[in-house]
Structures are given as C-alpha cells and as structure tokens.
Amino acid sequence: MAKLFWVYAFLLASCTLSISVGASGALRRDGLFGALLGGAQATRLADDTGGSACAGCAIMVGLVEQLSQLHNATVVEAIDKLCGYLPKDLHGPCDYLAKTYGPAVVEFLESKETSDVVCHAIGFCKTPAGTDMCHVFPLPPSIQHASSRRQRSDHISALRRRAEELAREKELNELLNTVTTGAFPNFCDFPVFHEVCKIIERWTEEHLPADDLDKDRYSDLASARGSSWRGKDCDDVSSNVHPGRKARDGDKLFDSNCNGISGVDHETGKTYEDMWCNGTGQSGVALLGDSIGAHFHIPPAWLNVTEMNELAFQHAIFALTNELDWPQLSMATGHYNASNWSPEIQGPMDSLYQRYVELNRCNHRDFQNAGVNGARSTSMAKEIASTLSPRNAETPPLLLIFELVGNDVCNGHPGTGHMTTPEEYYKAQMESLKIIDASLNKGSHVVLVGLADGRFLYDNMHARTHPLGALRNDVTYTDFYTYLNCLGVSPCWGWMNKNETWRNITSEHAFQLNAQLKKIADTQTFSNFDTMYMEYDIQSAADIWSKQGGQPWQLIEPVDGFHANQIGNALATQVFWNKIVQTKPKWLPARNPHNDDIVQRFGDQGGY
C-alpha cells in the first residue's frame, strides 16, 4: 500500500482536479499529491477537511476494499494485489506505505468501516465543527445510524484512539503522527522519495525538459517535458542542433534542424533541404495553455477495479513523469498513434501538427507544447509564456494556439470571489502576448482561444456512474463533484456543482472574459504575428460525434469528468481546422510537392 498510496495520491490530485504542478510549480508540504493540487487555488476549507490528502486516502482505501470484495480476498491480499498491478519500480514504495498505514486500514476495513471513515480514523480526513462528513462512497451503518453529529464524531474518535494504539504497538511513527496531529506527511522527506522529488521539482518549476544537456529547450528523453512535448532533439550536446531552426548550410553534412532531412543529391549537387524544403512554406505548431492543451488523462482502469490489471498500468511511470498529460496525443501537437499507449488511452489521434506535417514533410518535429495543468492568465504571464522556444528571422514561423479554457473561472472556492476579473484578465493576456511577440518571428499566427462553456460537463455527466462506483454502481458524477466541493479541492466549484444557478453564473463570467480576449483580437496589433479569436467549441465537436452515432458524454474524460478525452481531442482538431480554413485560409501552408520524394528517400525521417 506504500507506493500505492503515493501513486494514487499523485494520480488523483492531478486527475480529479485537472490540475498539476502547473501554476506555482513548487512542491507543497504534502508532497507530490499536494503539488498537483497546487495547480488549483488552495482553499481554507481544504485545510480544515484534509483536502487532497483526504481524497487520495479515501479513494486508495476504497479501491482496496473493492478489490477485496471483487476477488473474495482478505484486505491484506487486496493490498498485495493492488501493489502487484503496479510497475515493478513502484513495488518498493508500495510496500513501504503498506507497512506504515496497512495495519490500521486492514483492521478497520475488516470491521466493515468504509474508506471515508477509515481515512478519518487515521487522520487524513477531518470534519470541521458543525458540518457533515465529506464522503465519496456511501457511509456505513455505523455512521448512517448515528442520530447526531456528536454520535458520529464520537465513533470516529474511538476509531482514532484505536489507530493510535496500533501505531504505538507496532512503532509506526508516520501513522502515529498522522493520527495524533492530523498532519499529512511530506513524502518528499522520506528517503525513498528524495530523488524522485528532486527530479520532479526540476521540470515542474520551469516547465522545461528535465533532461536537456545543451539547454536548448529540446530533449531526446520522451517524458519529463521532453520529446513528448517538443520535437525530439537529435543532438542534445549541441545547442546549435534542435527542431525548428534554419538548416545549417543546407544540412549537407548533418541534420541541424532534426527534421530527418540531410545530405546532398549526387546528381544535382544540391542539398535535399535546398531541393525539397526551401521555399515550401515551412511552419511549426506550438501551444501555450492549460491541461486541456496538454491533454490531461487518467486511465479509468486505474480507478475502476472491474477493469484493473497489470496491463492497465504498463505506461504508469511514463504518465506520472509527464504530469499525467499526453501531449503526444493532443489536439495541437499529437504525433503518435494512440494504439502505442493502449490500453491506458484509446481513440483516434488527429492534431494540427500532424496535419501540418501531412502538408509539408519538412515540418517534421517542429512542434512545442507548453500546456501546464492549472494554468490561468496570471500564471501564463508570469511563468509559462516565456518557456516558448524563441524563433528568429531565419527560422520558419509558428502557428501558436494560445488557450486557457477554464482556470480563470475555475477553482475550489465557493462563489465568484476568486475568479479572474475582466480587467485582470485583459491585463494578464496582454502581458503574455507581448512576451510571445518577442519570441516569435514575422509571419507567425496566433489563435486566441476563449474559455469553454463548462455547463456541458454537468449536463452530460451528472447522472452517470463514475469509475469509482463501477463495481456497485454507488458513485455518480454528482456524488464525485459534490465530494470534491465538500473537501474544498474541486477543480471547478462553479461548473462541477449540482446548483444550476452557480453553473450559469460561472458561464456568464467566462463569457465576460471571452469578450476581453475578442477585444484584443479585434483591436490590438503585434509586430511578429496576427491573431484570430476562436471559441473553445465543445458543442460543435459533440454535434459531429452525434452525427456519427455517439453521445456527448463519450467526449469527456471518465475519471475527472472535466477534460476532453482522446475522441474529444481528435474532434476538436477537426473543429479548429475547419474554422481556420473558413476564416484564415492563407494561414495554412501549401502542400509540398516533394513530400513523396522525402518519404521515399528518408522514410519516417527518424520518427519521434
């Protein structure tokens, strides 16, 4: 249960809260789990309830309890089974947490307490005075039958005293500290997690590749902000070699721009770059945005015991080191077939970058994705916009997707007090665009993407069963959304809310912000790029899907109930592309007549 708790905490925080280490980057006192929650605005309520630590505990213990029921196994056997599903590199930490918290979890689950009650008993969850207990699963009879809040509190207190006894008997100091102080342990203080925390801090604070020897912002490592996010560096010891640069001396000796095209045609004496790329209208694709643009995804089998097995976790380490984002399959910069990552993620892959490469093979590897979980206009201006790899007069221009579709109205705070005001939004977006203007070269184009109408989420998901409830059909998305709001850790209190009035108020505020972004597109000019405003039109994607026989809920991530899934990303590409074709057709590059020659000579051009 050791790493199990850690992994699920890491996952859940990112997933359920659609956020990550993004907005602030710094690791919080509650370790990676809290760091992921740091992408959303922390709330006082979360401090009072246990927040992300409570959610991670309740869901992890709930999965153990469900596995025990599903496989007719003891709780100990269920813990072993869950740890066994994880990749081998995670078995050691899993054993560590199992040893630390397992004795109390086993005893209480065998006494027919539910995971929410267990996590209150061992100190991860708290119930503020005068409030009801936050719970994601149905409460057990011991709590349901209590006639007053005082009786429920007394029952929890008795369990907590027993947990303290167990901790003293077995000399479990971390458990004892959690039970007696209610303080969630900082896992980064545990020796077993020291190195991983240091590594994660490197790429989550700067949103740049963790492994980048020549510091050119490109890497040959796929994860940790590497080549999943930016074109693969074909020489990571030379800062003069990277995707997106101008071919050096026609790349007659080596491939300086990493597009897989180099050398000299012996019949003409010309370089292949000069013959087949120069003058063809090369262009790269980039994204600056949030978790939507980064393509946040947690495999539903990770939280659904009826689908859980070893195969479900085969790419877990890769996903964790990519902040649970899948930019290699995203709407803007996708470049892999989703089948490469099955069964964790499934569906068609289509992207703006892929379409650019299909038009011109010389654009190969010229992409950047700087999507950051939890990003909003202020963090974009302060720390994300500057991570774009700069272009110069000799390099191909960029098509840049500039999208922040939710976090300026979404956070865990009730009401509108923590939403970005129209004035703040306009100022921050202009600051970001000025930074971008200094990074791009002339001829570049920027699509300014408005906030979504998030009412689509609750309207299509609220009555459906969440993966956590798949075994017993006992957790709906309304239950899940309400639970996160109760803890103060919802990614979007306004939209993920059963109160229709608040959902409408949140959308109205989003529309006010969109008016500011449209104003920028209509009235502001920039030195190196022109702009167009575009709605984040999930409804148009749903209309396309409906014509194919699908249902709108099938476009939403099952675990977090908040993001577009793989199908939704592919359809979003189609919607974006069609709108560019209709309104800015000259933005799109012409087809390179030499594409077939390039493929015949260079094959997959080194792949990705």
Image (spheres, rainbow, N blue to C red):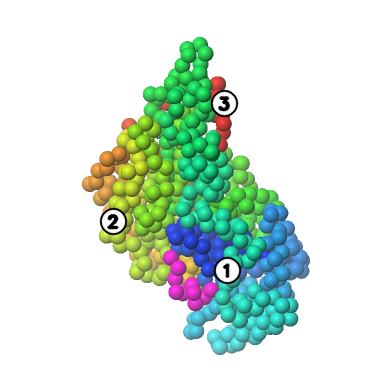
Badge 2 crowding class, 10 Å Cα cut-off, few under 14, some 14 to 19, many 20 or more, is: some
Q: Earlier in the sequence, mark 3 or mark 1?
A: 1
Q: How far apart are marks 2 and 3 (CA)?
A: 47 Å
Q: Which of marks 2 and 1 is in front?
A: 1
Whether tag 2 and tag 3 are in contact, CB under 8 A, the answer is: no
Q: Where is residue 60 in the image (x, y as percent from the top left)?
A: 63, 66
Residue 414 included in the magenta stretch of the image? no
Mark 2, residue position: 427
Task: Identify the mark at residue 603; answer none if there is no mark.
Answer: 3
Q: Position of residue 91 (x, y in %)?
A: 71, 58
Determine the secondary structure under disc 3: loop
- Kind of residue sitting beneath label 3: Gly
> In this picture, which residue range is highlighted in magenta?
41-50
Determine the secondary structure under disc 1: loop
In percent of the image, x 56 and y 88: which residue is there?
150
Q: Position of residue 412 (x, y in %)?
A: 44, 67
In percent of the image, x 45 and y 27: which residue is there?
248
Q: Splitting the image into 4 quarters, where does residue 359 fall? A: top left
Determine the secondary structure under disc 2: helix
Q: How far apart are marks 2 and 1 (CA)?
A: 37 Å
The quarter in which the N terminus is drawn is: bottom right
Q: Earlier in the sequence, mark 2 or mark 1?
A: 1
Q: Splitting the image into 4 quarters, where does residue 8 fall? A: bottom right
Badge 1 crowding class, 10 Å Cα cut-off, few under 14, some 14 to 19, many 20 or more, is: some
Residue projecting furthest to the left? 523
Whether tag 3 and tag 1 are in contact, CB under 8 A, the answer is: no
In percent of the image, x 76 and y 65: which residue is there?
77
Residue 293 sits above or below residue 74 on the image = above
Mark 1, residue position: 186
- Kind of residue sitting beneath label 2: Lys
